[in-house]
Every structure is written in structure tokens, then in C-alpha cells.
Amino acid sequence: MGNIVLLDEHTVNKIAAGEVVDRPASIVKELIENAIDAKANSITVEIRNGGIKYIKVEDNGIGFASDDVEIAFERHATSKIRKEEDLLNITSMGFRGEALASIAAISKVSLISKNKDEQIGTKAYVDAGVVKYVEPSAAIQGTKIEIFDVFYNVPARYKFLKKDSTEAGYIEDVVRRIALANPNISFKYINNSKTIIHTSGKLDLKSTIYDIFGKEIYENIIPVDYEYNSIKINGVIGLPKISRSTRIHQFTYVNSRYIKDKTINSALDKACSEKYAINKFPFCVLDIKMDPSHLDVNVHPAKLEVKFEDEASVFNIVYHGIRQAIENKNREDSPFTNIKKLEEDSIKKISEDLKNTGVIKDGAKNKKFDFTFTPKESYTIEEPKQNIYDIAKNAQLKSNVQINQGLSDNSTTLRYDKKENIIEDKKDTVIVENVDNNKENKESKEYEEYNINEGYTNKELLYKYIGQAFNTYIIIEIDDKIYIIDQHAAHERLLFEQFKQNYYSKDRNVQMLLIPTLIELTPKEKDIVISNISMFEKAGFILEEFGDTTIKISGVPNIGYDIDYSDMFKDIIDEILGVVKTERSEKEHRFLATLACKAAVKGKMKLDQKEQIELIDKMVKLENPFTCPHGRPTAYEISKYEIERKFLRK
């Protein structure tokens, strides 16, 4: 006689329930999703004893039709799909028809509901999957479901439940992540008579974030809005200051369904590399909108996993959407961006004035130069063939190079020759032809002089240099904001870009050592060097084996000042050991980042004023001056308003 038998329906229901309901939080999730599908705009969740003894989910949705109440507790009973083809185009949160049946199989359930098209409601009571009664009842539109004694009839599952506070925390997580995906719905979560979460349902994601997480996170998020290949992504991502060491505050959705997906996480991490500190994860709420026919949500009963038809497109939408949002914010807040824009605007205005009137208007002076009139009278100048930017360029006076390389007392002269129509470089003054209509003046004065004083004045600057704090931070002022620049992070970014450019070009920019350096290594360290020697050589090192455990360094990257290359070399080896299993591009990035970090000026290393200004100027020219290659910010902004609040002026 065989040993295989068919299980009875009661046992089958308990086994099936275990796939859908593994703890009280699973019950809450399923019931909330049913309320959302019922088009509710107000949902209340109330629990006691971590949801183990009591759960209530109440909504104002369309409600159950009286004829549907009893069958709703049967397995695979659903109103969401009708046939197999519907699985290819699922837009509802639920579709399996297992939730109520599974919940009822392991608990006691009371349901009161009234459909919007009926005059009276319906009440039902189910105990361990058995419908005890269904009867008419007074009710308002919507549905109220109460769950009692979860797993009371499944002792094997009951004993694995955690303590009440832990289970309540899981339920709070469920309510939070569903609320973030549905800012148009007002959610209320009550634990032991205390309101924990209450969202307004104002359609605004930022308002929902404020309701759930509070002011600090609300004030440090930026919008994400991007479209690629008919896929859209929107939501928010947090600034580095609110990043965490785990993914606890990362909420990712597809068509408002909360999911966990490796492709999305990988794109998120890559987009945030160089923007956030290593091993820090940004706060984010991201919802990907796509045609439901291009994904499969019928992967797991909990519906936390999906399969994408085109993972590459999903990766791209997340990567580019986040990267664009971060870079836009960095450009907006960075002192380097502001300096560059002020400089461009100033040059453009001067050029326009010269082109239109031949006169440099007082309000349009180049803020990098202090234009001082030396004659007592004012004269116009004949428009030269070159604008003021070209003049400066020809005289080797590019404002963003000459001034930022140092603060000298020298002045420079540009002479415009009337007869030859050329610019002539001289010292101390700019000679500008006098073309006054007064003949006598023309005869008596062929030229008038303007002084261009290199240096800074209080009103004519692109930025005002304040000084250096703690021999580490450079402080400048632009408009009504103060920027504090970390000299190490800024120099690290600058060197990283230089090393990267040299690394991927034929220019190795090597500095030969007069006396080669010998580095003693362990066998493992030496193997790492030999297996990655091409990286070292492309970065500017000239290496060769020198005995069993020794490497000879004959050439090093040309950094420009003396550093301890032995320590640098060993630190780089340690970094490679830490990322030996990652892809090559990641290994190269960390290699160059470590090289830049070790070569950069350190905190408490005093720079003179000329060096500080030169560093700022070079940062202005970079495409990405906003963070060091390890993700730390290069500059921090403090507004005048913030300072005045500290002094109780605001």
C-alpha cells in the first residue's frame, strides 16, 4: 500500500496561510492593500499586544457587496482578475485571492462592510476558516475588519512570534512604506491607544515624509523626476547628512508596489558613489512607473519580488534619475558653481556693454578686477575688434587664472593702439584711446589710463575671502551665504580628477626618484601588486621586483610636493585587498581615490592665502567639485539667516 495521501482542506489552508501570513505585519499589509484596491482615501490601523491579540483595519472604500462577503473567505476568490491573460497586466495591489482565506485560517475574523450601492451593510464572523454567520448589519460605507488571536490554532507558528514591541515595529514599517507610496491616502496607525503615524493624504510626498519622519529629513531631501524609454521615476532622495549605515530608510516601489530588488539597489549605489560617504546609504523614496505588461509581480506570495522584462532600462532610469537630481542640487548649492556663474555673467555683461555702447558701465564691471578711473574726466572708448574677455586673454590676464594664483600688488596694463588697432601689454595701467568729440581734447590727450588692480575689494568680488579656520577650512562669502571649504576634500577631488585623466590617457606624468625606494611586503601583498601592476604603472608608478618580498619604486606620480610614498604605496595595497573581488572599474576608482586621498593636503596643514585662492579657482573648473571621491562634501553652506537665528535676530 502506498504512503501518499491527499491532505484535508483544513490542513491545506493552514499550509497555504503560512506562505501569505508569517506574522501580524503580513495581515496588516494584506488588509491595507485590499483597502487601497477598494479606492479608500482614509485607512486606520489599530493594534494591541503587537497585533497578536487584536488588529483592526478600517477604510472608507467602496465596500463589499452583500453577496460577496461569504465567498470572499474562500481560497482563490478575487475580484481583481478573471482569466490567465489578466496576470500580464496587473494594476491592483492584490490579485491572488488568498489574503482573507489565509488570515481567517489562523485567527478569528469579524467583518462589517457596506457597499456604496447598497442601503444596508453586512456582518460576518469566521473562526479558523469556518464561516460562523453572515447577516445584515447597520454600517457606514467602507469596511472594518477585526482580527483576534493570531495563530491561536497554529502553535508551531505562534511560538516563533517575537515580543509585542518587536511585532508592533514590523507593523509600523508596513504602514510607513505603504503610506509613502500613497500620499493621496490618509493613514492612521494606533498602537495600544497611542497614535504613532498619522498622514494628511494631501497628495504631496514631502508632506507625507514630514508626517512620518519629521522636520530633519523633510528639510534634507531633493526631488527625483526622470523619464527614460517610456519608464518614469519620481520621488525623493536624501542629502548625505541624513544617510544611514543600513538600507533601513530606502523605500523602492514599482507602480506604487513596495519591492526589494537587486537591480534597483545596484543602480542606486552606483549613482550615489562619489556623492555619499563609503558604506553610507541615502534616504530615498523612489517609485518606478512602467507598463505592467513589462514586469511579472506573480513571483512570490508576499509580492515583495518582481521580474523585469528589461533590467537594463530599469537600471538606467534609477541611475540617471538619481544622478541628475544629486548633481542639480550640488550645482545649486556649491560655492564653486556660484563663482563660475558670477564670473561668466560678469564677462558677458562687460562684453555686451562694449559691443552696444563702447563704454564699460559702472554697474557692469568685471568683479574680478577693480577698474579705477585715473583721469578726472570720463571718456568713452572706441570699440575694439575684441571684447574685454579677448583683451584679457591676449594679455594673459584670464581672470580665473591670474588672480586666483595669488594676491599680488602688481597691476597690469593693456594698451589699445588707435592706429594699429591692436592691444599692447604694459605695466601698471590700461591705456584706452580718447575718442572724445571735443577736438581740443583729442589733440591734447591721445590716450587715457585705467588702472586694473590685482587684488580684492569689498564690493567688486566674485567672492569675498574671509580666511582659514583651524588650518583646515577655507572660508569665503558669496552674497548672503558663507561657505566653509574643506581643503583636504577639495584637494583630494582635484588630484583624483588629474590622476584619472592621466590614468586613462598616454600621459603618465611620472616623477623619477633620485634614489629608488624599496618596499618590504608580505607574500600576499606582493602578489596583489604583481597582479595589479598595470594599474600602478598607469597611475604613474614605475615598479620592479627586487627579491622575494621586495618591490623597488623608481618613479611615482608627479604630485608636486614631497610626501611619504612608502606609506602611500602600502595604503593603496590595503585598499586593493579590501576590494579584490569587485569589478575592475570599482577597483580602479578606489585605487585612484586612495592615491588622491594620500597625496592631498591634510587638515591642519597651513596653506598661505595664495595657495587657498588657487585651490578654489581650480575647483571651479571641475565638472564635479562637490564631493571628494570617497563621497565627503568639499564645501558646507551657512546662510546669513541661520547665523542671525543663532544670535536671536530672527
Image: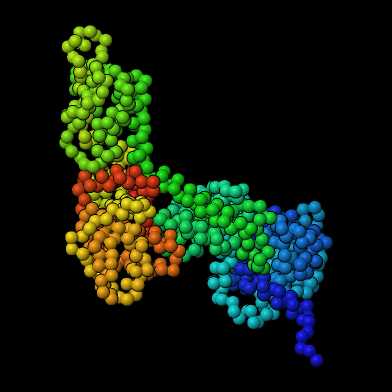
Position of residue 499 measured from the top left corner of the image (x, y, whole percent): 33, 54
Q: How is the image coloured?
A: rainbow
* Image height of 384 relative to 14, above or below: above
Toward which corner of the image does residue 169 lie, by quadrant? bottom right
Drawn side of residue 239 relative to residue 285, left or right: left
Residue 436 in sight: yes
Give the residue drawn at x 25%, y 57%: 602
Of residues 478 and 270, the one drawn nearer to the viewer in this rendering: 270
Question: Horizontal and vertical percent for residue 282?
Answer: 46, 58
Kindly identify the residue that appears in the image at 28 percent across and 36 percent down. Answer: 399
The foreground one among 619 and 507 is 507
Vertical order, 8 against 555 (above or below): below
Question: What is the total number of numbered labels drawn onto the structure image?
Answer: 0
- Name the foreground residue: 451 vs 558: 558
Does residue 642 appear in the picture of this structure?
no
Residue 370 x/y as whole percent? 24, 31
Q: Quadrant of residue 42?
A: bottom right
**Residue at horizontal 71 percent and vertical 74 percent from the top:** 16
